[in-house]
């Protein structure tokens, strides 16, 4: 291994024989080292590598800005998160979550804490990720003796969902707000509060999550899946639920200036019928 950059006494950026770059850590590893010097991999305690060049650069820059123990802590948290979630996680989670956790700990030391206005929505729409966020807070307190605001569980949850959906944090906030607004439309239309723990409602939330992601990221619309006869049958057999789907379409048109394709209205109608079957 050849040293590309000495980040500090404990962290180096090195390249292997193929030119692959990685961040390596070890107590005193960078002390009196020089760029271009060769170093024995047996001295490395931890190795961090990103497939994307842009992400590798961000990781290198982050390592120069946050304490090494915060990076190690985040890596351990991500390993636990991966053991609890079947979906693949974007590799940038290490960067975004380590940066967030380190900044949150620094803010706490300075007496500054943020609350998350969407905490209730995040808790309801992403329960698995929210519980993982709570787990992270417990581990952070155990390892750093810093008790972060409970709202940080919601922030961490969004970072996890962001890594699952390969999107940005700003888009995740927009997705969450769009889901919240959609559910307000639905409950106002049916004039009832739904059991959000019910399986069919959970399926509806999952559908809304991915639908909102496609919508806000301007991803290609679904290819046409339902023929005209099926459309007509749905309109005849589920007029109330289709009417609610249209209300959702109007809300999204006003909120995002985006029009919902007819097939998406049919999907929404089917989900709306499902969540109403056992709750009427």
Image: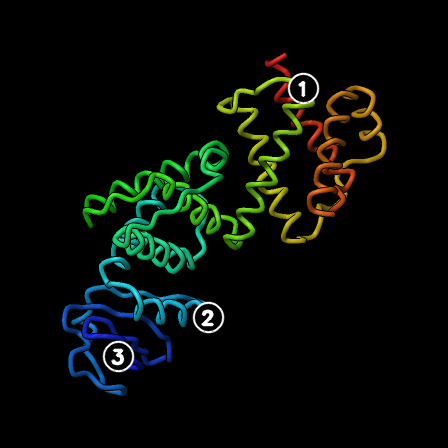
Image coordinates of residue 35 in percent, x first then y, are 27, 86
**Which element is circle 2 on?**
helix
Q: Which residue is mark 1?
A: 190
Against 220, is 130 above or below?
above
Q: Which residue is mark 2?
A: 54
**Category of crowding for the residue at label 1, using alpha-carbon neighbours closer than 10 angstroms: few (below 14), some (14–19), many (at least 20):** some
Please give the count of numbered marks on the rendered protein: 3
Q: Earlier along the polypeptide chain: callout 2 or callout 3?
A: 3
Q: Earlier along the polypeptide chain: callout 3 or callout 1?
A: 3
Mark 2 vs 1: CB contact within 8 A: no
Q: Which residue is mark 3?
A: 6
Rendered image: mark on residue 76: none
Q: Nearer the viewer, residue 96 or 40?
A: 96
Q: Residue furthest top?
A: 280
**Which element is circle 1 on?**
helix
Relative to 72, 200 lies left or right:
right
Picture quarter with the N terminus: bottom left
The color scheme shown is rainbow
Mark 3 vs 1: CB contact within 8 A: no
Q: Image point 33% across, 57% down: which residue?
A: 103
Relative to 166, 40 lies left or right:
left
Q: Image point 31% across, 68% down: which residue?
A: 65
Relative to 73, 210 lies left or right:
right
Query: Distance between the Cα atoms at labels 2 and 1?
Result: 48 Å
């Amino acid at each position: 291994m050849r040293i590309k950059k000495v980040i500090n006494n404990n962290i180096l950026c090195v390249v292997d024989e193929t030119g692959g770059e990685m961040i390596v850590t070890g107590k005193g590893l960078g002390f009196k080292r020089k760029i271009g010097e060769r170093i024995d991999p047996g001295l490395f305690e931890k190795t961090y590598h990103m497939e994307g060049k842009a992400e590798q650069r961000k990781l290198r820059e982050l390592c120069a800005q946050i304490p090494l123990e915060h990076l190690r802590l985040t890596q351990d948290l991500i390993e636990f998160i991966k053991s609890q979630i079947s979906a693949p996680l974007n590799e940038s989670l290490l960067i975004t979550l380590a940066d967030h956790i380190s900044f949150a700990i620094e803010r706490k030391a300075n007496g500054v804490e943020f609350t998350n206005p969407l905490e209730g929505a995040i808790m309801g729409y992403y329960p698995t990720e929210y519980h993982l966020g709570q787990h992270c807070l417990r581990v952070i307190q155990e390892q750093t003796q810093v008790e972060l605001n409970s709202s940080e569980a919601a922030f961490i949850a969004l970072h996890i969902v962001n890594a699952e959906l390969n999107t940005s944090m700003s888009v995740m906030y927009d997705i969450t707000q769009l889901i919240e607004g959609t559910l307000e439309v639905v409950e106002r239309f049916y004039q009832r509060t739904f059991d959000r723990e019910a399986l069919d409602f959970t399926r509806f939330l999952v559908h809304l999550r991915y639908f909102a992601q496609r919508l806000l990221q301007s991803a290609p619309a679904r290819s046409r899946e339902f023929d005209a006869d099926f459309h007509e049958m749905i309109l005849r057999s589920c007029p109330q639920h289709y009417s609610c789907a249209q209300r959702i379409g109007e809300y999204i048109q006003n909120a995002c200036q985006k029009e919902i394709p007819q097939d998406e209205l049919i999907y929404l109608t089917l989900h709306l019928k499902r969540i109403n079957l056992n709750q009427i």
